[in-house]
Image: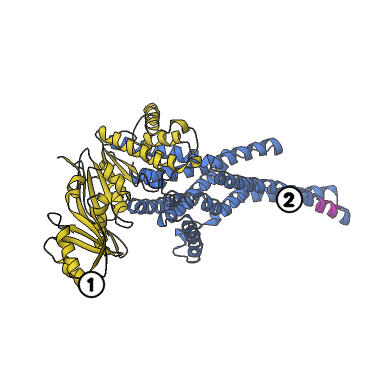
Chain colours: A blue, B yellow
Amino acid sequence: MICCKSFFKEISIILFQDFKQSVKNWKIILIILLYLAALFGSLMLVDKVEAELNKQEVKDSKQLYDSYGAGVQEFEETEFENHNLLLEAQDKYGSLHVLVPLIIGFVILPFIILFVGFDIVSADRFTNSLRHLVSRINRLPIIIGKFISLNLVLFFTTIIFYIISNLYLKFKLDLVIPVKELIHPFVFLILYSAALLSIVTLASTLTKKPFSSLALGVLFLIVSIWILSFDKISFLSVFANFKILFNESLNVKLLNLLRLFLISIVCFAVACFKFERMDV
Amino acid sequence: MKLIIKVLELCKSYGKTLALDKFSLDIPAGCIYGLLGPNGAGKTTLIGVLSGLIKKYSGQVRVSDKTDFSEIKKLIGLMPQDSSFYNNMSSFEHLKFFARLQGLTKSNAVIEAYRVMKLTGLDGVAKKNVGSLSHGMRKRLGIAQAILGRPKIVILDEPTNGLDPKIAKTIRDLIKQLKAENTTILFSSHNLYEVEELADFVAIMHKGRLLKKGSVLELKKSKSAEITIVGLKKELLNSIRIKPYIETVSLVDNTLLVSFKKKDETNKLLELLINHDVVISKIKKGDSLEDIYVNIVGEEI
């Protein structure tokens, strides 16, 4: 019991310390800001595209009206039809304001996590500062604390994005996205980043030099893309089941989240095993 | 004498290089133990094994009758060779952080951080970022974090390496002070005078093996001599080697480094050399730790 208590205490000390360090680290701050900028950029783009589409639809309808001299009724029918098509699309794929940032997040998160976490272990190992920690406490709390700390940074970044984007939609467009619709993308982004971070952490425990761990992290992500081409094992890739983001039943979505969770657990467990056994 | 560290048949290799080769050592409690040896002798590897940094090795380590490293770590404070810290943290923040890891509460960690800062003379730079500290100050910080929480054993890997004589002296004084508080200190050094001044016991290592160990007084009793000569033939050197009164002999740059088995037999040796037409230009009867070290390690080289 006492052992368990000290284990969690050690994790919390490392976690808090690393979180503080991350918040002070200009490199991490810059990358996180770029990530947020990309997500907000995608949101703005959705607004712009939707506005353009609406303008085009009205213009087309007016042209129809002028050219063929059809009555007002036809114009209204066309507009009604377009409106229905939009609603149908929204029903099928969900709100574009939710979907597009999700896709952008899916595409750029691997790069963000690679640059934020490639030296999660190797930096301390390279500078020998890890020796101070390892000579003082057990190794497991060190790697767990560091891993959770970076996950927390990404977790808070995602929360910040969702809060600010919803405030923006509410006050600029008077659009309220139901919480129910936000839960899946939110959990997906969190688990997806955890899975990616566990892969990068594993790479970081395998080499001593930060540059080598960056190269290894890139290699792991390339392998993850490569295994998508094998149907039987593609589910092992962190990038698998991309289409689930668009339209699938709740059960399939949950299974996909579970898959990401398991990838995180397995990769992180291997990283812990390696970290436990290596010479510092 | 109660032993606090017992090391038995330690073996550790890096690829084909043996860093520790069946290395055994006993360290008594409350003493200052010096590890001497040239670069690559295995001193840092031994320290790494004792402090749990190195995991892949064979042999036994027992510290204060404990073999589990999660318990051993609580007894040891380590200052690694190249102490590196987080540059954007202040000395005080560092020490508080490590004191917390030692298991102290927040308020006790603050008190302990201030205690060791005062002890190591860091109180003037408590709020300065570590990145802006001088080499000497960083060394002091390394020692300060090693003595946090008053560990039973303090291990210092080359604590005065690269320091100016004044700071080196303050660190040596600090080590003496720790001994006075009944702390066992194991340290490695290249500085023979420092080891002679500080250590109660010395282990001389080379290529992962223990060449000689014992108290400094004991080692200094062994008789040795340095004879600068010209014209020594290899056959004569070999015949000197097998003389019953010779313990070790080696030739380094025209200087014959000799240690005798029981008593000083320099005269007997000089007679032998003169009889073989060897020109003798200088004789130095040595009994400092440096002579002993050069004799022992010189022969190995």
Q: Secondary structure at mark 1?
A: helix
The residue segment tinted magenta is A59-65
Q: Amino acid at mark 2?
A: Asn
Instruction: List the residue tagged with mark 2.
Output: A82
- The part of the image, by quadrant, that contains residue B279 is bottom left
Q: Nearer the viewer, residue A32 or B161?
A: B161
Q: Secondary structure at mark 2?
A: helix
**Apparent side of residue B163 relative to residue B202 in the rendered image (left or right):** right
- The part of the image, by quadrant, that contains residue B227 is bottom left
**Apparent side of residue A62 relative to residue B219 in the rendered image (left or right):** right
Residue at 17% in and 62% down:
B269
Instruction: Give yes or no for residue B46 being in the magenta stretch.
Output: no
Could you give the CA–CA distance between mark 1 and mark 2, rounded to whole angstroms?
A: 104 Å
What mark, if any, has residue B234 been given in the picture?
1
Q: Nearer the viewer, residue A246 or B60?
A: B60
| Quadrant for the C terminus of chain B in the image | bottom left
Q: Nearer the viewer, residue B267 or A59?
A: B267
Percent position of residue A155, x then y:
51, 42
Q: Amino acid at mark 1?
A: Lys
Instruction: Give yes or no for residue A64 being in the magenta stretch.
Output: yes
Percent position of residue A218, x then y:
51, 59
